[in-house]
Amino acid sequence: MKKQILILIFSVLPTFAFAAGGGAQLESAPIDTSDMESVKRGAKHFIDYCLSCHAASYMRYNRIARDTGMTDAELREELIFTTNAKGEPTKVGSLMKVAMTDDYAKTAFGTTVPDLTLTARARGADWLYTYLKTFYVDPYRPTGMNNLVFPDVSMPNVLSSLQGLQKAVYKTETRQGVEVETVDRLELAQPGSMTAEEFDVFVADLVNFMVYLGEPVLNERKSLGIKVLIFLVIFFVFAYLLKKEYWKDVH
């Protein structure tokens, strides 16, 4: 029975790996959620390039302002550009929702658009970082773009004006006796407004914000964890001395 379970596990592992990564080598994302300036820049990038379609409906604007040290005035100037159903400016305490409905998304993109609040926790920072950098031109896709990490993705490359357009360079591999063409690497076919180094920083800031978005208390949790460990070390010393005091007559 145990042998059958092990065989089943090892048979499905490759499927999970392919689904998670699309066969692409993930890059290491330079993430530091304690860098609130990076988080603030990432929030601005998120508002400018993601929030028109993707909601972050479990996060409130004023939570971002509080954690990054922004005032309400700065928040309105830099992050809030929408109005409510009555045409009034969105309140600073509002959730980060979008007007796009699932029906419209299915018509426009062929699928519903996911909420991005927990995407970094579900996919991982490295996956997001690599995904945003590996769009390439594919004339056979409805949007004209494909992605190494997420093959046949429905999302257009909203960052193409910054990164430029990449083309795929293919190589031939033999798999189970059959020759297949796979993507060897991506090359820049048309430059964007940013250099490669500038775009890497841009994406790193965006992913850094999305990691923060998935767990805003991450820094507090880490800080608390260190304090708890220090307390346990100190408590151990006193507990050990107390134990010696109680048992000194026995020994």
Image: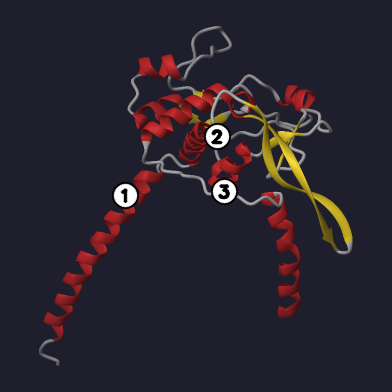
Mark 1 lies on a secondary structure that is helix
Residue in front for this viewpoint, 223 or 39 = 39
Residue 105 place in picture, x, y as percent: 73, 25
Residue 249 place in picture, x, y as percent: 10, 90
Sequence-first disc among 2 and 3 = 3
Q: Residue at x 74, y 58 (%)?
A: 15
Q: Which residue is mark 1?
A: 223
2 or 3: mark nearer the eye: 2
Q: Which quadrant would residue 145 be assigned to in this image?
A: top right
Query: How far is mark 2 from mark 1, CA to CA?
Result: 34 Å
Residue 60 place in picture, x, y as percent: 46, 27
- The relative height of residue 238 versus residue 157 in the rendered view (above or below) is below
Q: Which residue is mark 3?
A: 27
Q: Quadrant of the N terminus?
A: bottom right
Query: How far is mark 2 from mark 3, CA to CA?
Result: 14 Å
Residue extending furthest top? Answer: 87
Disc 2 vs disc 1: Cβ atoms closer than 8 Å? no
Q: Residue at x 58, y 11 (%)?
A: 85
Residue in front for this viewpoint, 244 or 184 = 184
Q: Callout 3: few (<14), some (14-19), or many (20+) C-alpha neighbours within 10 Å?
A: some
- The relative height of residue 248 versus residue 93 in the rendered view (above or below) is below
Q: Which residue is mark 2?
A: 196
- Give amino acid for label 3: Glu
1 or 3: mark nearer the eye: 3
Sequence-first disc among 2 and 1 = 2
Residue in front for this viewpoint, 174 or 127 = 174
Sequence-first disc among 1 and 3 = 3
Q: Quadrant of the C terminus?
A: bottom left
Q: Give the left or right position of residue 78, taking residue 104 as reference.
A: left
Residue 108 place in picture, x, y as percent: 76, 23
Disc 2 vs disc 3: Cβ atoms closer than 8 Å? no
- The relative height of residue 216 versus residue 97 in the rendered view (above or below) is below
